[in-house]
Amino acid sequence: MALEWSEVADRLDGSDDPGMLLDIIVLETDQTDWQGVLDVIRRRGDWRPRYSEDGDVLPLPADVAVPFARCQTASVIVELQLLAMYVRGYFWGTDEIEFDVDPGQINSPQRFAALTDLMTEFGRATGKPVHVTPESLHDTPLLTYDPASDDVVAP
């Protein structure tokens, strides 16, 4: 049974810590997992990806090796627009995939569905759980995509 917005709205509203972001994270990853996520981003044109290096907008690379090579000397970010939500991903290392979102932007059933769709796409691409957690609290998931059930759950 699909998780409903009304079941989790209070968990995601961010009112406990104004200014805090939510992390969308996949742990224990490698460059192959990142490539799978990058391929999903390229395929999902409705996410309107915007790739930048030190603030300069560039075409989204096909090979994930490019941003990882560039992140040694530049700030490398990919920003996705899901409805009117902005989700930003950072190429800090291959061992985890991390994006963040302002919880205040997850404010409707439609935006919640867009978030769970992103989680599902990333989980299917990697075959791994995808968690939404308070910023930097990766052991405190608010939502989890479970690859075994192919569903997003509230632990």
Image (cartoon, rainbow, N blue to C red):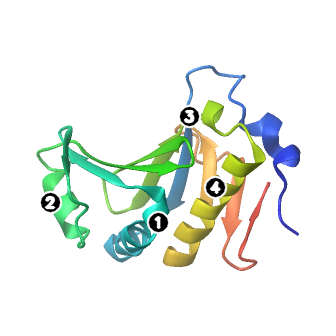
Contact, mark 3 vs mark 2 (Cβ under 8 Å): no
The answer to whether 18 appears left or right of 151 in the picture is: left
**Residue displayed at 55% across by 41% down:** 84
Quarter of the figure with residue 114: bottom right
Residue bearing the label numbered 1: 28
Callout 4 secondary element: helix
Nearest to N terminus: mark 4 or mark 2: 2
The answer to whether 93 appears left or right of 97 in the picture is: left
Residue bearing the label numbered 3: 102
Q: Nearer the viewer, residue 140 or 62?
A: 62
Looking at the picture, which amino acid does disc 1 mark? Answer: Glu
**Residue displayed at 67% across by 45% down:** 140
As drawn, the residue found furthest toward the left would be: 73
Nearest to N terminus: mark 3 or mark 4: 3
**Residue displayed at 87% across by 45% down:** 6
Circle 3 Cα neighbour tier, 10 Å, few/some/many (<14 / 14–19 / ≥20): many
Does residue 80 lie above or below 20 as drawn? below
Does residue 122 lie above or below 19 as drawn? below
Contact, mark 1 vs mark 4 (Cβ under 8 Å): no
Front of the two marks 1 and 3 = 3
Q: Separation of disc 3 and disc 2 at Cα? A: 28 Å
Callout 3 secondary element: loop
Residue bearing the label numbered 2: 69
- Residue 36 shows up from this direction: yes
Looking at the picture, which amino acid does disc 4 mark? Answer: Ala
Q: Separation of disc 1 and disc 3 at Cα? A: 24 Å
Residue 136: where, in percent of width, then height? 52, 39
Front of the two marks 3 and 2 = 3
Residue bearing the label numbered 4: 114
Residue 127: where, in percent of width, then height? 55, 78
Q: Nearer the viewer, residue 110 or 119?
A: 110
